[in-house]
Image (tube, grey):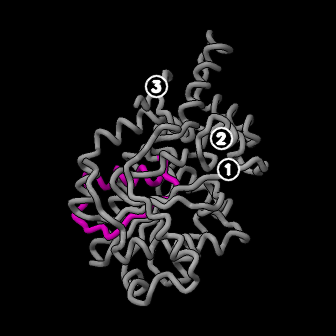
Amino acid sequence: MNLVSSEAALDFTKLRIESEDQTQIFYNRYNNILSGLDESELETLKDSIVIVVPGFLGEWLQNIQGYLSPLKIWLNKKAIPYVVVETNSNKTSEENAVKIREQIKTAAKTKKKIYILAHSRGGLDTLLALTENRPQAKISGVILIQSPIYGTWISDAVSKWCQEWKDTFFAETEVAATDCMQKVISLSGGKSKAKEMLAGLWDTILAMKSLERGQWMKAHQDKLYELFHKEGIPLLSIVTKDEGATFRFTPYEVFRRKMWGINISNDGVVPSSSMKVPGTSFVFLQENADHSTLVEKHEQKSFFQSRVLETAFDLVVDGSLSKFSID
């Protein structure tokens, strides 16, 4: 099966990642209100440190839209210690991985168990931090929420469109990538952004192109196998989709509709098929959830958010995630 299109991008409608589907087990627990973290599991987490890794624009959105609020509220309510890594959207994954490793080193000094919870691009930074130059520290579990493991159609499409836009209208002049990002934002209904933010957006677009991500995953498959099989670190990916004809008042709407129009299941940003790591476990949420639903403040979604978090940690902490070969 040829997964690469004529435009040197992955065909997300054909992408099949060999991972263990834990969806039924997840919902058996999710739907039982009496199910969740038992006393011993909760005590384990209370005596642990959860390292939270934000996604793109996390450093701005935490103060503007309540980004990560559902995670912080749930962790505080359960009295689970955590730290948010100060990653930077204008830095490369290599630079952000350094900060994640520093937090791992600090947490390891406490002799407590370490869990990592990452959203979106934060999952890519996390995988890099764990596969290259990882500190001598035992990681007890990893949860990735909506991470573009194999990239995203948006990055493929926008980078291609920006090049065509430049070649068509500005063949004789130098057009900065930030100008194209401003154009993309205006087309999706957004307002003008600072140049710093636009530069970070362009770098992230390039880093999440599917061909580049596919090549990275292939180059690191042995190290990933070492982590999640030989070391037995439990990893759970939370996969989402946002489907249906109803118009969504979100910045993702134009991309959500574009992807659904070519039969790519997605959450408005990341194709659902791209959110899984080979040889690990995943759950595919049945409810519609766009790229912000689980991580931004939504009063009407608070119960859903907390149940997803509790059930995910339940699966990771109790050791029930299966382990199998990716050979």
Amino acid type at image mark 1 = Glu
Please report the residue visible at 37 percent of the width from the left and 62 percent of the height from the top: 235
User: Can residue 85 be seen from the camera position used here?
Assistant: no
Please report the residue visible at 74 percent of the width from the left and 43 percent of the height from the top: 190
- Mark 3, Cα crowd under 10 Å, few <14 / some 14-19 / many 20+, is few
Please report the residue visible at 49 percent of the width from the left and 33 percent of the height from the top: 11
Q: Earlier in the sequence, mark 1 or mark 3?
A: 3
Measure the C-alpha gap from mark 2 to mark 1. 7 Å
Q: Quadrant of residue 108?
A: bottom left
Please report the residue visible at 61 percent of the width from the left and 50 percent of the height from the top: 267
Q: Indicate yes or no whether the magenta region holds residue 306.
A: no
Q: Nearer the viewer, residue 69 or 315?
A: 315
Q: Earlier in the sequence, mark 3 or mark 2?
A: 3
Residue 257, position as x, y percentages in the image: 70, 40
In the rendered image, which quarter contains the N terminus? top left
**Residue bearing the label numbered 3:** 8
**Residue bearing the label numbered 2:** 260
Total marks in image:
3
| Location of residue 262 with respect to 236 vertically, above or below | above
Amino acid type at image mark 2 = Trp
Residue 22, position as x, y percentages in the image: 44, 64
**Residue bearing the label numbered 1:** 243
Residue 52, position as x, y percentages in the image: 46, 65
